[in-house]
Image (spheres, grey):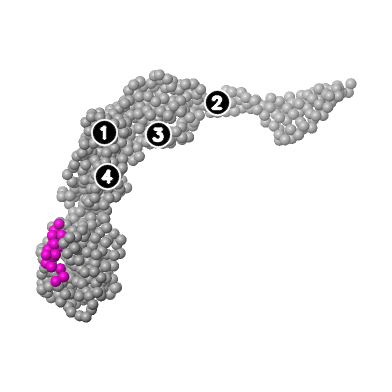
Amino acid sequence: MTIGFDFAPLVDGWLIAGLAALLLPLVALALARRSRGGLLRLGLVLAVLAVLVNPIASEESRRPLSDIALIAVDRSASQGIAGRPAETDTALAGLKDRLARQPGLEVREITIASDANGTPLVAAIQQALAEIPQDRLAGVVAISDGRAADAALAAGPGLPAAPLHLLATGRPGERDRRLTVLEAPSYAVIGKPVPIRIRIDEGEPGERIAGVPATVTIAADDAVPVTRQVPVGEPTTILVTPEKRGANLFDLKVNEGPAELTPANNRAIVTVNGIRDRLRVLLVSGEPHMGERAWRNILKSDPSVDLVHFTILRPPQKQDSTPVVELSLIAFPTRELFEEKLSEFDLVIFDRYRQRGILPSNYLSNVVDYVQNGGALMIAASPDADAPLSLYESALANILPAHPRGPDIVAPFRPALTEAGRRHPVTALLPHAGKPGEEATWGRWLRMSNLEARPGAVIAMTGAEGLPLLVLQREGKGRVALLASDEAWLWQRGFEGGGPQAELLRRIAHWSMQEPDLEEEVLRATARDGTIEIERRSLTPGAPPVEVESPSGKTRTVTLQDHPDGVAIGTVPADEQGLWHVSDGTRVVSVAVGDTGGREMADVRATLDLLAPAAEATSGSARFLAESGLPEIRRVRPDRTMAGAGWLGLRQNGAYEVTAVSQVPLLPAALALILLLGLLMTAWWREGR
């Protein structure tokens, strides 16, 4: 119970002030003239003002409030190694027991887990402090290894108003071998080496350690791993080569060191997106025709394509009066293109080409070797495919996916997708192709070669009389595509509604150049929004289940849902960070989930340095449990020292809440009336004498 004094004026304060300003000068004048009753007049004026001011006595009933201590327990990934979980549990149990013996103290506890950016220890403490009245906060005790990713926030205005004490797990001066990627390219040209800068540390970052170097193993997807000796503490550059378009995963791993807390930070996954350099395409047109410009426009519209195009305007056996200087600007460099620089091209296209003595047979044999060694060849069929001078009678015949079986068919027909064509990435989901069993709404073509496909070739489209129109085949390391008609330009002109001519020719060209997105037999895995999306494309319906292996080694079987476009899909929760492996029994792909460089596990050595400034700024303390053990708890006044050897202090605030207030006037009405009348009559009697 507490007594205080206050005022409850009967009228506005400005009226009281005005009355005092009017009466007090008159009384002062009377006193200066030594008038009779001057002192009584002064007393009367003061009594009137006192009555108007109305002094009161206040009596409060108070209830003391308990102080609040916050315990922040770090349960991040780095706290799960080297005996730290048991050390944390022991310290937490002992701390809660000692706090429970403190009278007038309420204990609140929060648990902090790591996220993609590390351990948000300071942010979690600040969020918990927002729900605690500052006048009741006794202090914060954090049980952690000190690896707070947001330790810089502790230097700002979010510091607690009470002491922050750090009880650190682990040991001072710990050492741990770890691999850090300093620089890595995001994109690189396929087939060209690119540098990745790494550093192997065991103590402080950049601390050089003489002696046996570390062994780093570099594995590129499913390639044979290579090893390299790397000095400890020195930045080192290693060269890697992306071999495919899209994501190339390079798995870097260093052997365990003499002092190892965890092998989790001995590994890093570097993803380099492989891109093609400018594609070089050689287009040889046997004669001018309407479809020639279609090919040229499609290839020239792609800024990543360097096109070399030759059109044979007049064969050697044709004689007319046209001057040679008007037929070409330069001579056809056959030897340079088909012998010296053929391997530099990514795609060779023969468009309505016939053997007319321009290219000797040995040059066409070079094209066969080019394809067998990984090159891409496309044939846009010419009329009279069964004629003696056609390409089917040349050295290319052994690698072409079809051969003539009769004269050309000259009749309108509408191209159609086969069952394999609906699943093949070159023709799957072409616009307006119609559903299975329905006819496409494309315009008709008017002529095609009469061909028979070779065994093993994929017939993606058929034409007149159900004959092969688009035939695709792998040959050696390369690929060959055959379009048995030169009438695709009718779609571009919108004949009978047209069709997806540009899209079809673009897909054929890119499939021939082994574009990864157009592989017909492929397994892919992509990490997105907390799940791993699995996609298996195949020409054969009914995809088998796939085996998924998590970074921890756990495996699970995932059933894929097959779709008519040749793609079977499935998903699995990505509940672990690191490198996942997906296998369909034949192919194995890897996918990196989360920050595989491991920000949380990048450096797991226990430290006081990150949080010591915040502890010092709040008069708290930072100490290793392994050195001093669990300290005693003391309640101290806010102006006293908050920590010492073997103990830590929690502020004793003395907070309270008012439960009741009673007020008693010091001048009750009756007493005020008697006082005023008494002074008034005494002053009248004194002045009347």
- Amino acid type of disc 1? Val
Question: Of marks 3 and 2, which one's residue comes earlier in the chain?
Answer: 2
For marks 2 and 1 on the same chain, the one whose residue lies earlier in the sequence: 2
* Residue that numbered label 3 is attached to: 151
Q: Residue at x 34, y 21 (%)?
A: 627
Which of disc 4 and disc 3 is earlier in sequence?
A: 3
Tags 3 and 1 in contact by the CB under 8 Å rule? no
Q: Nearer the viewer, residue 507 or 632?
A: 507
Image vertical order of residue 254 relative to residue 323, above or below:
above
**Label 1 residue SS:** strand
Image position of 120 (left or right of 222): right
Residue bearing mark 4: 195
- The image position of residue 128, as x and y in percent, is 43, 34
Dot 4 falls on a residue whose secondary structure is strand
Amino acid on which disc 3 is placed = Ala
Q: Which residue is mark 2?
A: 62
Q: Marks 3 and 1: which is nearer the front?
A: 1
Q: Is residue 364 magenta?
A: yes
Q: Residue at x 23, y 79 (%)?
A: 322
Hey, what amino acid is under mark 4? Answer: Pro
Mark nearer the viewer, 3 or 2? 3
First in residue order: circle 3 vs circle 1: 3
Q: Which residue is mark 1?
A: 232
Residue positioned 23% across, 55% down in the render:
516
